[in-house]
Image (cartoon, rainbow, N blue to C red):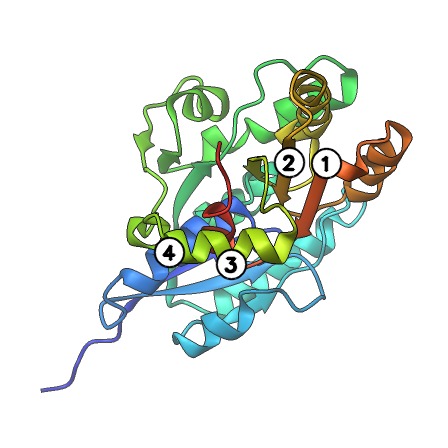
Amino acid sequence: MRQEEPIRVLCVFARLDFGGAETMCMNLYRNLDRNRIQFDFVKHTPEKCAYEDEIIQLGGRVYEAPVYRIYNHAAYCSWWKHHLKAHPEHRIIHGHYFTIASVYFRIAKKLGRITVGHSHIAYPNRIDFRDRLKDSYCKRVEKYSDYAFACGTEAGKWLFPGKEFVLMNNAIPAGQFAYNSSIRSTVRKELGIENGIAAGTVGRFHSAKNPYGTLEIMKRVHSMNPDVKLLWVGDGEMRDDIENEIRKNDMSSYMVLTGCTTDVSRLMQAMDV
């Protein structure tokens, strides 16, 4: 008897690097029954991304969409029309890249596809014109989503203010984070934080993660206890700005920036808080 082909879900991202949404999706992908369900991916960058090799190894496919620039709206829509007509197997479009999801969801729905919007973040305090414009643009996705997912209640209320949504907890392999004194000792030695208290944070250098707030907290904490150092795991477009701020405020002696890594669980062993 011929085995049926797996359902292929097309997951749409800006990039396929070690971000929170991408990692959550990959954790699900690694653990699902890929004989029944397969994930394929769309990225919006010509650069090779961190998860691409693993996706291909797991049987997925990676497609490159053009970067959306507003002025290339027609060309962008044309890419999606061509892709969906060429790939009828992509019956479900899962939009993690929700900033422009209303654009590709609208096309997908016209071609009879199922659309799934997914909110990974909430912006409760947008104030300037550009942010309000982006906020309004993002929320168009609600109109074109057949189903709505969110990582938390606030994230769901922000992106889907008039729609019911399903809370999908982040998929975390908890066993990787079990305390291990040997790993802790090794990592702290490697990072030069054997003594004192290691505060830690994991997140990309992006305004959504409030990196300037992290610096302000550390300045105050360090003024109260000079033995505290910050272990900062992540990377992003604001890294140069943050490094400049660290130097300007003479914080380099108690800041350890690791950059982007697949070794988050190991690094967290070194953290006290």
Residue type indicated by callout 3: Thr
Q: Tell whether label 1 touches label 2 (CB within 8 Å).
A: yes
Q: Tell whether label 2 touches label 3 (CB within 8 Å).
A: no
Which of the two labelled residues, at mark 1 and mark 3, occupies the earlier sequence position?
A: 3
254 vs 164: above or below: below
Residue type indicated by callout 4: Asn
Cα separation between marks 2 and 1: 6 Å
Looking at the rendered structure, which numbered label has been put on residue 230?
2
Kindly report which numbered mark, 4 or 2, lies closer to the viewer in this rendering.
Answer: 2
Residue closer to the observer: 2 or 45? 45
Cα separation between marks 4 and 2: 27 Å
Residue for badge 1 = 254
Residue type indicated by callout 2: Leu
Looking at the rendered structure, which numbered label has been put on residue 27?
4
Kindly report which numbered mark, 3 or 2, lies closer to the viewer in this rendering.
Answer: 3
Residue closer to the observer: 42 or 52? 52
- Image coordinates of residue 248 in percent, x first then y, are 90, 30
Kindly report which numbered mark, 1 or 4, lies closer to the viewer in this rendering.
Answer: 1
Residue for badge 3 = 186
Cα separation between marks 4 and 3: 26 Å
Cα separation between marks 1 and 3: 19 Å
Residue type indicated by callout 1: Tyr
223 vs 50: above or below: above
Q: Which residue is pictured at 37% across the width and 68% down the height?
A: 89
